[in-house]
Every structure is written in structure tokens, then in C-alpha cells.
Amino acid sequence: MHLAALHTPSQIQLNKDGNLKHFITIEGLSKETLTKILDTAHSFINDQNQLVTNNLLEGRTVMNLFFENSTRTRTTFEAAAKRLSANVLNIDIARSSTSKGETLRDTLWNLEAMAADVFVVRHSSSGAAHFIAETVCPHVAIINAGDGRHAHPTQAMLDMLTIRRETKKKFEDISIAIIGDIKHSRVARSDIAALQTLGCQDIRVVAPNTLLPHGFEHYGEGVRLFNKMDEAIQDCDVIITLRIQNERIDSPALSSQAEFYKMYGLNQERLALAKPDCIVMHPGPMNRGVEIDSSIADGDQSVILHQVTNGIAVRMAVLALSMQGQLQEKGLLEAIAV
């Protein structure tokens, strides 16, 4: 697939009124836009910490186009759309016409002709969501559900919502450690971008040199690199552990699971170095005993399951806000507390 496009993702994510049109990447979005997403997501959770249901997207059609498998992300997008009363279609890409020789453009144009309003796209190629938004389906809102090693913006925003709700602190006042395979993690890239945009001044990236991306020094102000785990998590408010992809094990990048756990696994002794109220997060799926000890994953400081709930709320917010121009015309946007 040729992924070149005429504009950067940040140039096409907002409409002429400055409202969200597509959600492709965190980069290029303002603090105000990210805060609006967080505030909208928060409005979809009631005082009993339960997700609400409404008819904001009644009559709209959301199509999940997952060229790359991810049951968890697809299911939460489906749950989010249904809570907004949208019609949801999960397209079996493996059996679609693209496997019979039809071009991606033709497949997407046909899906667009079925009155689709939103495409939720997950793809193994970096830039796929941008390519679709720019060159294929200009009248359909494109939500990036993860593309290659590039970005996973809704995961970043559910992480930000979890941090805001669980710590009750301003982003400017927290210290956060992100631990694991930074090099291959689109979650790490999007989390760092969101934290920087929201004003976090103390972002600690923890990994062996083999799992760090080239040009790490370009990540910008507020990001520090640590090779030693114990130093990195000292007095942290938030710890995010990342999944080690199994294909990295027993490779030049990573000698063994046991060695990684010894050097970078989060256990009780290491967690004790952080602040007493430090929260522990993981984007899932977890490798217990590799990135994180089971006693931590299931412990009182873990908010991993809260992330799942917050993920539905964030995806509800992004779906609703991507349709906000049309919702405003119908007088429905007032139902969203933004």
C-alpha cells in the first residue's frame, strides 16, 4: 500500500471550525482539544462509575475495519458505538473483496456507499488511517485504532482519562514512568505525545538500549531516559508497563523473558520505591511474570480494569465528537457535557 498523502495528519484532523473531524494521531492536536475529549468521556461515566447510554448517534453507521487482529480494541469500539445507539458493522477483512483482488480504494468506496458515517481502522501499516482519510473517504470520519508502530490515539486518551480520574492530580504535577518495549510501541509514542501536550513535565522512559527507538533525543522537553528500573520509578505517581511482544523474545533485542523480568519486571519490591498511592497501568494484553507480577496486576494499586471501562468512554467521546458538526445541526450536542 502506498501511504503518501497531501497533508499531515494534524492538518486534516480538525474541520474549519476547529472541531474534531478525524482522530488519527495525538501529534498536532492542542491541549484544549485533548481536554475536550477527556471532558466528554468523563460525561459518559456517572457518579456510580458506570457507563451511560444515550441516542446521540442513532441512525449513524460505524464500521469497524480491522486489517490487524485485536479483539479487545474492536470490542470496546463496538460497545462504545452501541451505547451511543449507532448501527455497528464489523467487516471481516480477511474474507473481504480485497482478498479476491479488489483494490483497497474500491473496497472502501463500496463501504462508504453503504452510508457509513465512521470507519474505525486498525492496520499493520503505519499511516494507513491517514491514507484512508486523505485519499479514499473524505466524507467519512476516520478513527485510528492503531497503525503499525505509529500511533494508537484512543489508547493514549483512555490512559490520560485513567490518570486524571485515579490520581486526582494535574498533569503538570505528576511523575510517570513508561517501561518496556518503547521501540515497537505505538502506545508509548501516543502516551508521550499526550502527556507532553497536557503539560506533564516528568516523563521517565525505561528500557534496555535494544528496545529504544533511534533518535530518542528528539522526544522533547520533559522526557528522560533510564536504563535502571529502580532509579526510574523512585517517587512516581504513575507506572505504565508495556507488553513485550513474544516475537522479540530470544532475539538480539531481548535475550529471554526471565532476563527481562529480572531487569525490568514490576514486582512488589520495585513498586515500593514509588509513591504509596502510585497507580499501575498496562494497555494489555499482559504477560504476567514478564512485564508485571501477578500480585501487582491484581493488587490494590492496579487500575488496569479501570482502563478498559475508561476506554469505552473515550471511544464514545471520539465517535460523538467526530460527528459533532452534524449533531449540532440537530441540536443534540448539548447532551454532551463539554
Image (cartoon, rainbow, N blue to C red):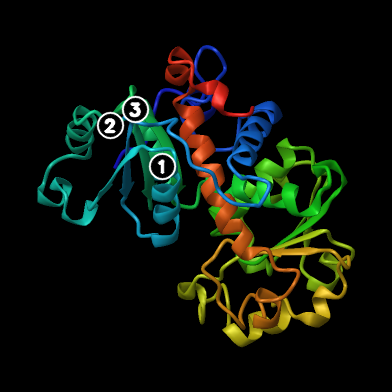
Q: Are marks 3 and 2 in contact (CB under 8 Å)?
A: yes
Question: Could you tell which of marks 3 and 1 lies nearer the N-terminus?
Answer: 1
Q: Do the residues labelled 3 and 1 touch (CB within 8 Å)?
A: no
Instruction: Report crowding for label 2: few under 14, some 14 to 19, many 20 or more residues within 10 A (C-alpha).
Output: many
The residue sitting at 38% across, 38% down in the picture is: 85
- Of pointers 3 and 2, the one earlier in the residue sequence: 2
- Residue under circle 1? 81
Within the image, what quadrant is residue 240 found in?
bottom right
Q: Residue 181: horizontal and vertical position, in percent?
A: 60, 65
Q: Point out the tag, 2 or 1, that comes first from the N-terminus.
A: 1
Q: Position of residue 159 (x, y in %)?
A: 64, 51
The percent position of residue 213, horizontal first and vertical second, equals 61, 56
**Identity, as a three-letter code, of the amino acid under mark 3:** Val
Residue at 62% x, 37% y is 43
The Cα atoms of the two marked residues, 3 and 2, are separated by 7 Å
Q: What residue type is labelled 2?
A: Ala
Direction from residue 160 to residue 126 in the image, left or right: left
User: What residue is rendered at 60% in x and 39% in y?
Assistant: 41
Residue 313 position by quadrant: top right
Q: How far apart are marks 3 and 1 (CA)?
A: 15 Å
Residue picked out by circle 2 = 116
Can the viewer see residue 153?
A: no
Q: Nearer the viewer, residue 29 or 1?
A: 29
Q: Name the residue under label 3.
A: 140
For the C terminus, the image quarter is: top right
Residue 15 at x, y percent in the picture: 49, 17
In terms of secondary structure, where does tag 1 sit? helix
Amino acid carrying mark 1 in the image: Ala
Disc 3 versus disc 1: nearer the observer: 1
Q: In this view, does 111 lie above or below 122?
A: above
Quarter of the picture containing the N terminus is top left
